[in-house]
Amino acid sequence: MTRVPGSTHHNPLTQRIAWVLWPSFLMAGVMEVVFFTLVQPEDLHFFGEPVALSRQAIYTLGFFTFWAMAAGSSALTCFLQRSPWEMNRCTLAPEARPIGCPKRQDGCGGSS
């Protein structure tokens, strides 16, 4: 299927990925600003030892950690908001469905 410029048809997977990654990216930025306003990178300890990384490395790791956490939350929200139709739809072509399937189209479906 070719995509026409200006078309409103979107790939659902691409759309869901955007729904997860974009808001989580924005929230990671907010979380990083708030966290590193309150905590200095030099004050961080890991298993009782000071973190032996540069400030920039700590900020970078912090951002990606916050982004991963926010993306996990957004992904869970997208997973839980799926409709019953999305959850129960059959991914097999009508002729590939097993005999007895009520949605089979060759007349070999179950009872009518």
Image: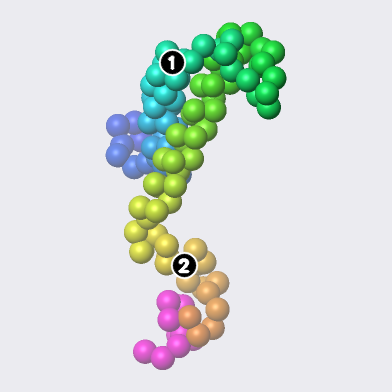
Residue 95 in sight in this render: yes
Q: Amino acid at mark 1?
A: Leu
Q: Amino acid at mark 2?
A: Cys
- State the residue position of label 2: 90
Q: Quadrant of residue 111?
A: bottom left
Classify 10 Å Cα crowding around label 2: few (below 14), some (14-19), many (20 and above): few
Mark earlier in primary sequence (2, 1):
1
* Residue drawn at point x = 46 percent, y = 67 percent: 90
Residue 88 pos. (x, y %): 42, 67
88 or 50, nearer to the observer? 50
* Residue drawn at point x = 36 percent, y = 64 percent: 84
Classify 10 Å Cα crowding around label 1: few (below 14), some (14-19), many (20 and above): few
Majority secondary structure of the magenta segment?
loop
Q: From the image, which quarter does the N terminus lie in?
A: top left
Task: Give the side of residue 111 with respect to residue 47, left or right.
Answer: left
Residue 3 in sight in this render: no
Q: Is residue 110 magenta?
A: yes
Residue 42 pos. (x, y %): 59, 10
Numbered mark located on residue 60 in the image: none
Compared with 86, 12 (above or below) is above
Task: Give the side of residue 3 with respect to residue 53, left or right.
Answer: left
- State the residue position of label 1: 38
Judged from this view, the residue extending furthest toward the front is 48
What residue span does the magenta drawing correspond to? Answer: 102-112
Q: Nearer the viewer, mark 2 or mark 1?
A: 1
Q: Quadrant of residue 73?
A: top left
Compared with 13, 106 (above or below) is below
40 or 88, nearer to the observer? 40
